[in-house]
Image (tube, rainbow, N blue to C red):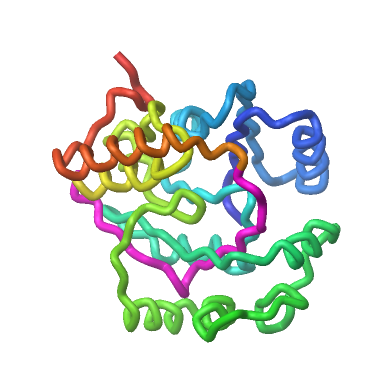
Amino acid sequence: MPSEICIADDGSDRDTENVIRNFRYANPTLKIRHIWQENLGFRKTLILNEAVYSSQADYIIFIDDDCVMHPRFISRHLKRAKEGHFATGSVIRLTKCFSDKILDQREISWSKQGLPVGWQPRSISEKLKSMPFDYRVMGALDSLSPVRCSWAGGNASTFRDHILKVNGFDTEMAYGGEDKEFGARLINLGVKGRHLRYTAPLYHLYHDRGYVNRSQLQKNRAILKQTRSSKKTFTNNGIFTE
């Protein structure tokens, strides 16, 4: 288990608060922080910055609320942690039908193979990512299939100190590429990416994306392009502002 869980809540209702309260009651020895902000649209970058700033952890693992962790997810991220690096895992996208089945369960049932009961992988790659092999075996699979590594906000981790050096996430960015822009600044700083495609997968629950704004996506692409071309490492619209 992690030493602390921080829920960075971008404006959910009291139902979420009740779930967190019940989880706290069921896990009294686990430190759980709930940081909430008013729902004024997609402001994920703002609440993430607040969560990072208020954290006392040396190493932070990021996941999204629409994802289900593999049983060995946390331990694998921690085993692959390395100073001067960030890590990004893969996302296995579940169908709407199977996502609904998971959400109807009180607890997710896992098979002995480490797969959600009833789930059928759509490829050999998906099946391998989900298998309960030793992390050294999964690391070998990662090495045999290298890909260009960028920060994926729903499944990534790094040292808190690295995040502070680039001033966190750019709050001028809404949905669409805000995680990649943050990762680009880490890379510009000299922090190297490690891809955990097989080592640390997540299962992504199906959902609609009504918050997508086309004009904002264009703005985000322009910011990302400028960050990459200028080799910028620090944003003025981050954790610390002038």
Residue 153 in the magenta stretch? The answer is no
Asked if residue 14 lies left or right of residue 43, the reply is right
The percent position of residue 234, horizontal first and vertical second, equals 24, 32
Foreground pick, 230 / 2: 230
Residue at the (81%, 61%) spot, across then down:
107
Asked if residue 127 lies left or right of residue 183, the reply is right
Which image quadrant: the N terminus?
A: bottom right
Instruction: Find the residue positioned furthest to the top.
Output: 242
Residue 196 in the magenta stretch? The answer is yes
The percent position of residue 33, horizontal first and vertical second, equals 63, 34
Q: Is residue 56 visible?
A: no
Which image quadrant: the C terminus?
A: top left
Foreground pick, 165 / 64: 64
Residue at the (31%, 61%) spot, across then down:
149
Residue at the (62%, 80%) spot, across then down:
121
Q: Which quadrant of the structure image shows residue 38? A: top right
Residue at the (52%, 29%) spot, across then down:
43
Foreground pick, 147 / 223: 223
The percent position of residue 27, horizontal first and vertical second, equals 76, 48
Q: Is residue 92 visible?
A: yes
Q: How many marks?
A: 0
Q: Is residue 95 above or below residue 165?
A: below
| Range of residues picked out in magenta | 189-209
The percent position of residue 72, horizontal first and vertical second, equals 58, 68
Asked if residue 105 lies left or right of residue 82, the reply is right
